[in-house]
Amino acid sequence: MEYKISELVAATGVPKSTILYYIREGLLPQAIKLKANVHRYRDEHIELIKYIRYMQEEIGSSNEQIKDALRSKNQSLSSSSVMLEPLMNTLSSIPKDAIHYTKEAFMQHCNIEAAFLNELLHDGILVPLSENDFTDKEASLVRLVQSFQEVGIDYAILKAYVSHARALSELDSQMQEQLCSVRGDENFSTLWKIMFETLFNAKEYIFKRYTYKVLLKTLKNEVLK
């Protein structure tokens, strides 16, 4: 379909001035010029505006990041590395200002032996950026495992978390494959929203709600005893 600028504003809720700004910045393609002062916009413009607004408001992406991402929009989800960058940065759980250590420096920082570190790596408790790139995030997990050991409890729950996390990552991969299978110019912003919302919001909500329900049940049972 083709739209007047007023219809584009109505369909997206984005002011005319903002839409024209997106065009000037190269975030949106130019309108179809039928004749002087007569311009028309397409469904692609609506889809792109949805994507731009989502990335700005929910992910905090800059115009340049979005512009780079949109250069890859005709690729599949799995190969759109630039578009995945904001997602990957968030999922890494490593802050941008994190302090990095080599393996040797990390062992000294945590005051642990190589055998203990290798055990945590083998169990999947620690997932460093590389075999020689550790951060304070890994150090906090080392301290947590040590706390388990201090009270004489095996950190089996963390090992179970690893097992479930691996299974969940396979589900996430299956979701991505399904999204790729229906990928098109008319729905790519919706597909990205599904991915981001599932990984950032739905997963956290579902897990925390069930943890809440179990703890609440435990508390109620204790009160009734």
Image (tube, rainbow, N blue to C red):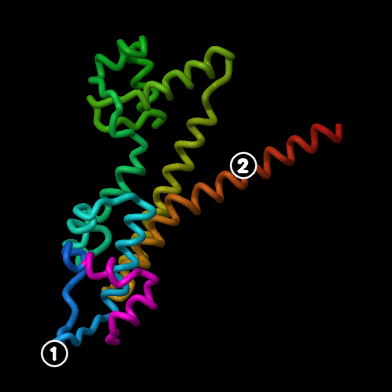
Q: Earlier in the sequence, mark 2 or mark 1?
A: 1
Magenta residues, as a range? 1-22
Question: In this orientation, does residue 81 appear?
Answer: no
Q: Position of residue 167 (x, y in %)?
A: 44, 47
Which quadrant of the figure contains the C terminus?
A: top right
Identity, as a three-letter code, of the amino acid under mark 1: Lys
Q: Is residue 90 above or below residue 36?
A: above
Q: Position of residue 212 (x, y in %)?
A: 64, 42
Question: In this orientation, does residue 24 appear?
Answer: yes
What residue is shown at x 61% (from left), y 47% (from top)? 209
Q: Number of marks in the image?
A: 2
- Residues marked 2 and 1 touching at CB (< 8 Å): no
Q: Position of residue 100 (x, y in %)?
A: 26, 24
Q: Which image quadrant is residue 25 in?
A: bottom left
Q: Residue furthest bottom?
A: 35
| Disc number placed over residue 211 in the picture, else none | 2
> Would residue 154 appear left or right of 34 to someone viewing this image?
right
Q: Is residue 36 above or below residue 179?
A: below
Q: Main secondary structure of the magenta part?
A: helix
Identity, as a three-letter code, of the amino acid under mark 2: Thr
Would you call the spot at circle 1 few (<14 residues within 10 Å), some (14-19), or many (20 or more)?
Answer: few
What residue is shown at x 30% (from left), y 43% (from top)? 89
Would you call the spot at circle 2 few (<14 residues within 10 Å), some (14-19), or many (20 or more)?
Answer: few
Q: Which residue is mark 1?
A: 35
Circle 2 — which element?
helix
Q: Which image quadrant is residue 83 in?
A: bottom left
